[in-house]
Image: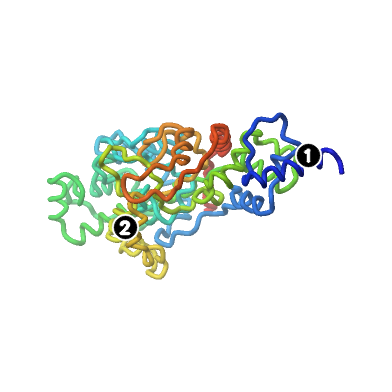
Amino acid sequence: MKKNTKFKLALAAFAAIAGTSSLSFSMGGDWFGWFDSWSDSERAVLESMHIGKLGPAPKDPSNRVEDMRAAVDLGKRIFSDRRFSANQAVSCASCHDPGREFQDGRPVAIGVGTGSRRAMPLAAAGFSPFLFWDGRKDSLWAQALGPLEDPVEHGGTRMKYARLLSEHYRDEYERLFGPMPDLAGLPQDAGPFGSPAERAAWAALSDKARADVTRVFANMGKALAAFEKTLYYGESRFDRYVHGVLSGDKAAKQALSREEKNGLRIFINKGQCVTCHNGPLLTDGHFHNTGVPPRVPGKPDPGRSAAIAKLQEDEFNCLGKFSDAQPDQCGELQFLATDDPRMAGAFKTPSLRNVAARPPYMHAGQIASLPDVVRHYVDAPKSALGQNERKPTPLSEEEMRDLVAFLGALSGPITEIRPEK
């Protein structure tokens, strides 16, 4: 038996005895290719994480225009239009900046006021059945409507938005949705979530007028969603490396450094990160309590547990009258678990794609850097509300550094994939 083969076998035996597939002590080179040696089960996991496994986003039956290029074009224009806010200074792009991973880099979002959670990135949001950190919306178009009426985000009213659409986007709107309702004689500003005067003006409208204006508002959300659904993550160095492992391409195997490869092993094995951050988007799309400290000490955010009732009562949910779906197409909503105690203090698992470009972290920017995030999960502190699902996971300082290095290899371009017609 050749000396190198004996060495590799001895190294593999050492790894097996150590109970881990990551070796964190320093040693030059790549140990005769050991860092690129993966078991069949590990290769299957790597393949499942490759961006090429993603495919197109699932169809949303509640939005009939999402695949229309005209809806994408209209939504993209509205997305950057600052007139759709109370102070004429805030657009969707203010918090979801295309130049900053479609988020804003702040601990919490700032619109016409200051929010309590940070803006989530929008790339690949069309793959999620529930939107926002707490999942209080069940479609991209319903999600798009929330900030528009929120008093600290856009702060406007649906009547004002209907007037803006009628004045500036009437032709584009009517080609997609049919005739704009007659708004003559209706108040300039009115809505169910505005100022006392705006709410009173809304209450004074006829049922038909409220329904007509609300449908225009809902259609505005559907156009925004059509644009947002075109945003996808592109290939990262991690994806090139996985291609190299699966195909035997030696050049592609050099896409990651030795430290990044070791960090990848920790990610899918000892660190247990892949338990929640799996699949091509590196998220399970679910909600978890991971002991993240409250933004305001002593006032923990209930997260998912408080959002379920909001989702069920939302007039823009899949079963609502403004949805284009049939009831039997709304299974996610109809079979929603409403009494799971694990949802107290639980928040949505974010995608780790491009994560190194998006500090600070967690639902309200409580953790400043990726090394601090990794240390948080290693320590698994007690949760201020509910129970932390994580258990302490002892990693050495070098293992934590390698894990952070790997997370930096997940960055790639954000691409816009437009419908064909």
Q: Residue at x 34, y 65 (%)?
A: 319
Disc 1 from disc 2: Cα separation: 56 Å
Q: Which residue is mark 2?
A: 308
Labelled pair 1, 2 in contact (Cβ < 8 Å): no
Q: Amino acid at mark 2?
A: Ile
Seen from the viewer's position, the closer of residues 413 and 269 is 269
Which picture quadrant has residue 102? top left
On the image, the x and y values in percent for residue 60 come to 44, 59
Colour scheme of the rendered structure:
rainbow
Q: Residue at x 81, y 42 (%)?
A: 5
Seen from the viewer's position, the closer of residues 241 and 142 is 241
Q: Residue at x 78, y 39 (%)?
A: 7
Seen from the viewer's position, the closer of residues 323 and 111 is 111
Judge whether 144 appears above or below 109 on screen. Answer: below
Question: Crowdedness of circle 2 by 10 Å Cα count: few (<14), some, many (20+)?
Answer: many
The local secondary structure at tag 2 comes to: helix
On the image, the x and y values in percent for residue 226 come to 44, 51
**Where, quadrant-wise, is the N terminus in this rendering?**
top right
Q: Which mark is residue 302?
A: none
Judge whether 398 appears above or below 19 on screen. Answer: above
Q: Give the residue furthest to the right.
A: 1
Q: Which residue is mark 1?
A: 7
Q: Give the residue furthest to the front.
A: 17
Q: Amino acid at mark 1?
A: Phe
Q: Residue at x 54, y 44 (%)?
A: 271
Which comes sooner in the sequence, label 1 or label 2?
1
Judge whether 141 appears above or below 167 on screen. Answer: below
On the image, the x and y values in percent for residue 129 come to 43, 56
